[in-house]
Amino acid sequence: MADIIDIDEKRPHKAGQAMCLDCRYEWTAVTPAGTFHMDCPKCQSKRGRWLIDADEREVDKFICTLMKENRALKQLVADLVLNAKERAEET
Ligand SMILES: [Zn+2]
């Protein structure tokens, strides 16, 4: 008889810091990739969220807003990225 394989074990997993939006409890969560809503291990609320993902999205949104508001800043950021690349190539 064939062994039973748990399909969730074969999916890529993600580990990271999560926080409950209700009780602010923080824990290290491991879930199948693509999971965004987790059960809080402390209060059992469904409002557990990735801490890092939220931060990255907020930073992206912040940069997008700045860029829309200021084309000169967009040029400045482009120059900074170019400078950083040039410096990285020199070393
Ligand atoms: Zn909680």
Image: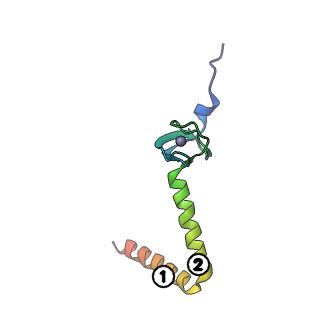
Of residue 34 and residue 43, the one placed in the foreground of this image is 43
Q: Is mark 1 within 8 Å of ligand 1?
A: no
Q: Give the CA distance from mark 2 to mark 1.
A: 14 Å
Give percent across and percent down for residue 49: 56, 48
Disc 1 designates what residue?
79
Question: For residue 54, which quarter of the picture?
Answer: bottom right
The residue at which mark 2 appears reads as 67
Looking at the picture, how far across and down is residue 82, in whole percent? 47, 78
Q: Residue furthest left?
A: 91
Residue at 60 percent across and 45 percent down: it is 47
- Residue 83 percent coordinates (x, y): 43, 79
Residue drawn at x 53%, y 66% is 59
Q: Is residue 27 left or right of residue 34?
A: left
Q: Quadrant of the C terminus?
A: bottom left
User: In the rendered image, which quarter contains the N terminus?
Assistant: top right
Answer yes or no: disc 2 within 8 Å of ligand 1.
no
- Identity, as a three-letter code, of the amino acid under mark 2: Met
Q: Is residue 44 above or below residue 89?
A: above
Q: Residues within 10 Å of mark 1 (few under 14, many from 20)?
A: few
Identify the disc placed on residue 89: none
Task: Give above or below for 65 relative to 33.
Answer: below
Q: Is residue 90 left or right of residue 53?
A: left
Camera-side residue: 16 or 87? Answer: 16
Q: Nearer the viewer, residue 15 or 51?
A: 51
Between circles 2 and 1, the one closer to the viewer is 2
Q: Nearer the viewer, residue 53 or 20?
A: 20
The amino acid marked with disc number 1 is Asp
Q: Residues within 10 Å of mark 2 (few under 14, many from 20)?
A: some
- Seen in the picture, residue 69 relative to 35 is either above or below; the reply is below
